[in-house]
Amino acid sequence: MNRLVKLYHQLGSPPTFYRITGKWLPWLLGGALVLMFWGLYDGLFVAPIDYQQRESFKISYIHVPAAWMSMFIYLAMGIAGFMALVWRMKVAEAILIASAPVGAIFTLLALLTGSLWGKPMWGTWWDWDARMTSELILLFLYIGVMATYNAYDDPRKGARVAALVAVIGLVNLPIIHFSVQWWSTIHQASTVSLFGKQHIPWSMLRGWLIMAVGTKLYYGYSVLKRARLLLLETEKNTAWVQKIIEQECRHA
Amino acid sequence: MTPKRKKRLMVTLLIVLGVAAATALMTSAFRENILYYKSPSDIAEGNFPQQRSFRIGGMVKEGTFHKADDSLKVDFVITDYAKEVPVHYEGILPDLFREGQGVIAIGRMRPDGTFVAEEVLAKHDENYMPPEVAASLKKKPAADTAAPQESSQ
């Protein structure tokens, strides 16, 4: 436990964060690629088709992990935003800003694959039901975080305002999750729950779970890579960044 | 924690709590007022808009689906196992449309009590299973909790 606390404090300092996460990147990317290829292969070629939706069910091997990630990344971004607001941590600000584009892409992917799935199954590309509308609001929140950050000349001030947007938007997460219970929607209820009964056999669930882990590793890779670049940019006048530039020049 | 940080923590928590409370109030109000679709029981109580189109949701009653031989005109009955509404529709039905399946129809109520749909959407449930499993469940529909039509909501 003490080692974890120590690691947490080390990661709060930009130079140490930059040094430590640099070692993680290849592992995260490698793990993400292996798991995402495996998950897609398992879902598309090994898993059986659905008794009602037939092959169209296979869209879920993109749709479900993407939708899970759209909410997971927002939660991570909200927590980073909270830390940025209260403790003014530069690393938390970088994680917040770096998360937004990754989360936005997953949200867009969930919306698009859902639309492609909805046309043959439900008979419509889009419908303003509670699940789809709240997921669309999630996309706008991600865009809002990026837009507010870019609206300020001072990146630290921009990050603080963006953090406020992110933290306020956290309230949308339970709405997305419970929308299918609270309102009568065309979107079906949750198939997988953490503690309740699963409504899917293991042979079909496996691909979702492999993809869920793979996409999380990809997020880890992508957010750290972006956050490192952001820190280099905002800290470009400090000694540790100058030292890294010197080292890179010597290598080149 | 420094007093400054403590103050920032309180302010941030207050903002989060305030927004959460306001949203909770709004969503609970929406839950009463904004229903995505009406059920056949709502229709039976006269609880539906007369002048504009709206949505009605329920199950397609077994044995009520009729299709005209020479056109895309179809008739079926939507039920919520309490009340029923006859529906008339002309057009292409989604893949998942079948008797015993949940559907949502968008259209108007005719004075004679028939719902004329402009669009029919199929609703599927949260259960997924391979065709072989579904077939074997159908053979012995006894007390399996994972029966396809059973909704856990």
Image (tube, coloured by chain):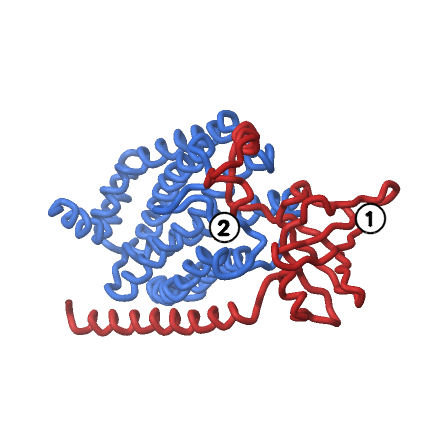
Residue at x 82%, y 45% (from the top left corner): B72
Residue A56: x, y in percent? Answer: 60, 36
User: Which residue position is annotated with label 2?
Assistant: A189
Determine the image quadrant of residue B135: top right
Q: Nearer the viewer, residue B72 or A113?
A: B72
Residue B113: x, y in percent? Answer: 76, 64
Residue at x 34%, y 53% (from the top left corner): A76
Q: Which mark is residue B73?
A: 1
Residue at x 61%, y 58% (from the top left corner): B82
Q: Secondary structure at mark 2?
A: loop
The crowding category of the residue bearing disc 1, from other C-alpha atoms within 10 Å (few below 14, some 14 to 19, many at least 20), is some
Q: Which chain is red?
A: B
In the figure, the shade used to draw chain A is blue
What chain does badge 2 belong to? Answer: A
Residue A214: x, y in percent? Answer: 39, 36
Residue at x 77%, y 60% (from the top left corner): B114
Tell me if residue B109 comes above or below residue A198 in the rendering: below
